[in-house]
Amino acid sequence: MRIVVVDGRDSEVFGRFFGVRDRVGREWEFPAGLGIDEARVLFAGGHADMRVDGLGVVDGDEWLGIAWLDCWLLENTDTVDVELAVESRYRRRGIGSRLLDEVIERARSDGRTRLSASVIADAVTGESAGTAFAEARRFVRKHSELHQVLELPLGAGQIDGLDRPVVGYEIVQWREHTPDDWLEQFADALRAMSQDVPQGDSGLEATRWTPERIRQAEARRLAQGRFCHTTAAVDGDGRLAAYTQMGGATGSTDLYQFDTFVRPEHRGKRLGMAVKVPNLRSLQAGLDHRVVLHTWNAPENAPMIAVNNHLGFRTVDQRIAFQRRL
């Protein structure tokens, strides 16, 4: 067996690497994640905020397992996010442990002192083979999120029945590019969201969003073949009070509810529903096939989970955040 480094330049190698990750993910009823073309853009490099690397354990021509590494360059520069995936027929043979040892060695040589990992677990118990592997290797649970899904399209009457406009707020919408007039305010809202989102005791730094960083993220999203619908609520003073975003890869059967954020001083007015429903209507208007809309929220974020439940989302599993100090 040997370790293969994956950088995305060799399309055949990258296809074998990605295939392992994709097959392992599909063992769950509602798999989620990037498609191969989206992933290849990340591995191509040249990103100001992150570097993405891959490793594979290969025996002859057979790929046994892989590691996907996200190395952050602006915040959390002490951390490597790692995802391990081992083909089912090769488990309990030390493949995951060998990959983890290689990840640790590389992280230390890069000056990193912490590994983080998101592991899928049962919706009720929060346990899985992945959580058992992590805990056996000195990873510590830091946070959990409920993975909820909504199958689309909904009937037009269903969406109309959910619509609850809020007096005193104007709804504004945009697609792939944030309008210049809203760029500064949207960057401020994204920063506030990064600071506000529940993360347990993970100790991770919030993302420092700027207008320039928004434009970089938009360009990367387009390069990946992805789209995004944004809906915001603006108060009577012209301030962006709430926003939500949904999107994913064009033509995919899996789409994503991204951030939903309401500024603290505007909470309690049902602005979450006021932005989500028109955004859902906008998203659904462009669909010509059935899709699954995915979202994740911390169990303690009861107001947002209540909004999701009202929209028809249901919980299918949990995502558990682990960390290990090196």
Image: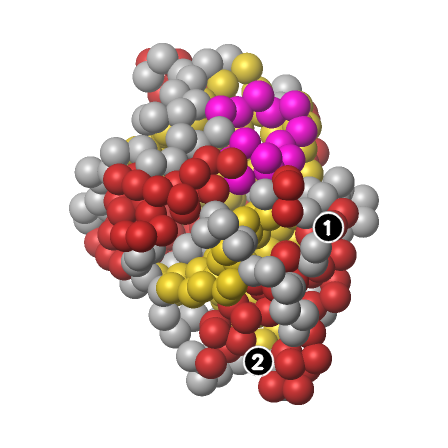
Verify CB contact (< 8 Å) between mark 2 and mark 1: no
Is residue 202 in the magenta section?
yes
Residue positioned 81% across, 49% down in the render: 124
Q: Residues within 10 Å of mark 1 (few under 14, many from 20)?
A: few
For badge 1, the amino acid type reads Gly
Residue 250 in view of the camera: yes
Q: Is residue 142 left or right of residue 310?
A: left
Q: Is residue 141 above or below residue 271?
A: above
The image quarter in which residue 276 lies: bottom right
Q: Is residue 125 left or right of residue 75?
A: right
In terms of secondary structure, where does tag 1 sit?
Answer: loop
Residue positioned 65% across, 23% down in the render: 201
Please tell me which of labels 2 and 1 falls first in the chain: 2
Q: Which residues are magenta?
A: 193-205
Image location (x, y in percent) of residue 119: 61, 40
The colour scheme is secondary structure
Image location (x, y in percent) of residue 126: 75, 42
Image location (x, y in percent) of residue 211: 30, 41
Q: Nearer the viewer, mark 2 or mark 1?
A: 1
Residue positioned 53% across, 25% down in the render: 204
Dominant secondary structure of the residues highlighted in magenta in the image? loop
The disc at residue 297 is none
In terms of secondary structure, where does tag 2 sit?
Answer: loop
The disc at residue 153 is 2
| Residue at mark 2 to residue at mark 1: CA–CA distance | 28 Å
Residue 2 in view of the camera: no
Q: Residues within 10 Å of mark 2 (few under 14, many from 20)?
A: many
